[in-house]
Amino acid sequence: MGLHRARSEFRRAHAAGRLRGAVARLMRRCARVCTLGEAAPGSGTDAGRGRTGTLVRGPRRLTEVPLDRVIGSVQRAGDYAPGFLPLVSHDEERWAGVYLALEGQQGLPPVELVELDGDYYVEDGHHRVSVMKRMGVRSVEAYVTPLRAV
């Protein structure tokens, strides 16, 4: 019963992601989550933020991060609509497995995030972030690597 419910929840999230993407395209907005490259210095989208130079990684730390501050992906932005709704249908089994693990209170490893100007981008743990956001979880345990422009 649990796997059936998890798959059903994925299908609802996937449909919502596709709908959100379609509406965003009609409104000429971004139909996927942000990429770190779009926010990084020299990307063309940071002119109003006054950043120049390249990014330097700071020391990694384990901390609790509010999920509403996780806004993008380092490499997989095309797989998720805003809010980390899944866009790729073949992710169903993996997504459902994470859903079951979280629903059953099983421990999952911390996600890997990078931080730039108070916003967070997923390096590893996209499915965990997607499922947690869908379940209404407010924060996630994460290894966070801060980035700063030099």
Image (spheres, rainbow, N blue to C red):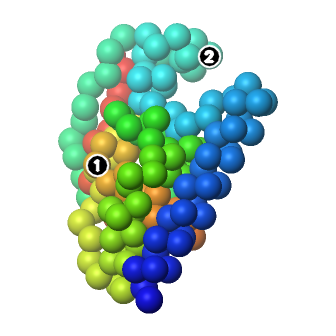
- In the displayed structure, 22 sits above or below 138; it is above
Q: Is residue 25 left or right of residue 143?
A: right
In the image, 89 versus 71, the foreground residue is 89
Q: In this figure, which residue is indicated by the disc labeled 2?
A: 48
Badge 2 element? helix
Residue 103's image quarter?
bottom left
Residue at 27% across, 25% down: 56
User: Where residue 112 sits in the image (x, y, percent)?
Assistant: 28, 50
In percent of width and height, residue 43 lies at 46, 14
> Number of numbered discs present?
2
Res 137 seen here: no
* Image-based side of 58 in relation to 48, left or right: left
Label 1: which secondary element: strand
Q: Residue furthest left?
A: 59
Crowd tier of the residue under label 2, counting other residues whose Cα lies within 10 Å: few below 14, some 14–19, many 20 or above: few
Nearer the N terminus, badge 1 or badge 2?
Answer: 2
**Residue 78 vertical position relative to residue 139 in the rendered view, above or below:** above
Q: Within the image, what quadrant is residue 22 found in?
A: top right
Q: Which mark is residue 124?
A: 1
Name the amino acid type tagged 1: Asp
Foreground residue among 56 and 111? 111
Q: Name the quadrant of the C terminus.
A: top left
Please state the horizontal and vertical placement of residue 35, each as a whole percent of the image: 45, 31
Task: Say few, some or many: other residues with alpha carbon within 10 Å of mark 1 (under 14 / 14 to 19 / 20 or more).
Answer: some
Residue pictured at 22% horizontal, 46% vertical? 60
Q: Amino acid at mark 2?
A: Gly
Please report the residue visible at 51 percent of the width from the left and 46 percent of the height from the top.
Answer: 87
Please state the horizontal and vertical placement of residue 90, each as a whole percent of the image.
38, 52
Name the image quarter holding the N terminus. Answer: bottom left
